[in-house]
Amino acid sequence: MKKLAIYGKGGIGKSTTVSNLSAALAMRGLKVMQIGCDPKADSTRNLTQGKNIPTVLDVLRQKDKIQLEDIVTVGDLEVLCVEAGGPVPGVGCAGRGIITAFEKLEELNAFKTFEPDIVIYDVLGDVVCGGFAMPIRGGYADNVCIVTSGEMMSLYAANNIAYAVKNFGKRGYASLKGLIFNAKNFENEDKLVNDAAREIETNVIYKIPRNPLIQIAEEDGKTVVCKFPESDMAKDYTRLSYLLFD
């Protein structure tokens, strides 16, 4: 079982990237589990017809005893979808919620039961503390990728995430695999991202071009890989899937 955590600033297109990557891997015949670690709980929407699925924290609030089927939803292409969820607004810590969700998945033997080939964690990277660092420091992920564009705040977040990964890497935890460049198509963007990669001492794994098919697919609650499987955009995600999991 291979485990990858994908981080990035909120709004950078991280969940779009992750769900399309999951779909591309599933298209290759691999069993994939995608775990959303954002309090908004929208990581897997494009794999579940645009619908929000029950989150681990919501189910824990509603039931004393829960089963795996309460918190694991089978999405498009048989991708196993999990959303950690977040606290009641204004009460509790979102990071602690992620820790609680991970502990529950472990308690219920989720990985042993489903035996996924690949587990992908979709993690909000605006802050890298507490529960948000759990996939890095808890031994849950083998590698980390960071989704970024050339926008200043996106690159700032990427630098912070990379710093955290390298600190934890010294203790034998997950290592940084590189940047996934989700292009916004403005002037000098390629240079900005490549310069940032050199400063971070990592590489740009793949550049995902901007494409209107993304929005069209998401309006239908789908990934591009599922809705437009023969498109160039779907092929981009497939290429990325081989670069990350050959």
Image: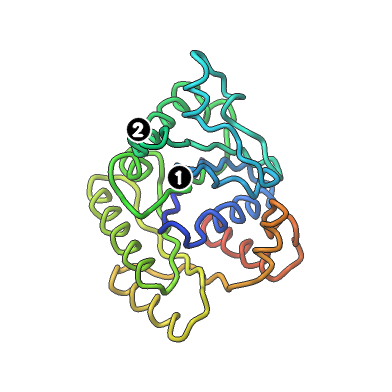
The extreme front residue here reads 90
The image position of residue 182, as x and y in percent, is 51, 68
Q: Residues within 10 Å of mark 1 (few under 14, many from 20)?
A: many
Which is in the foreground here, disc 1 or disc 2? Answer: 2
Image-based side of 107 in relation to 21, left or right: left
Q: Identify the residue at image location x=35%, y=44%.
A: 132
Hey, which residue is sitting farthest bottom in the picture? 187
Of the pair 65 and 110, the residue shown nearer to us: 65
Q: Which residue is mark 2?
A: 91
What residue appears at the point 38 percent right and 79 percent down from the top-left corner? 192
Sequence-first disc among 1 and 2: 1
| Quadrant into which the C terminus falls | bottom right
Q: Amino acid at mark 2?
A: Val
What residue do we see at 43% from left, 48% from top? 123
Q: Amino acid at mark 1?
A: Asp
What scheme was used to colour the molecule? rainbow
Quadrant of the rendered image containing residue 141? top left
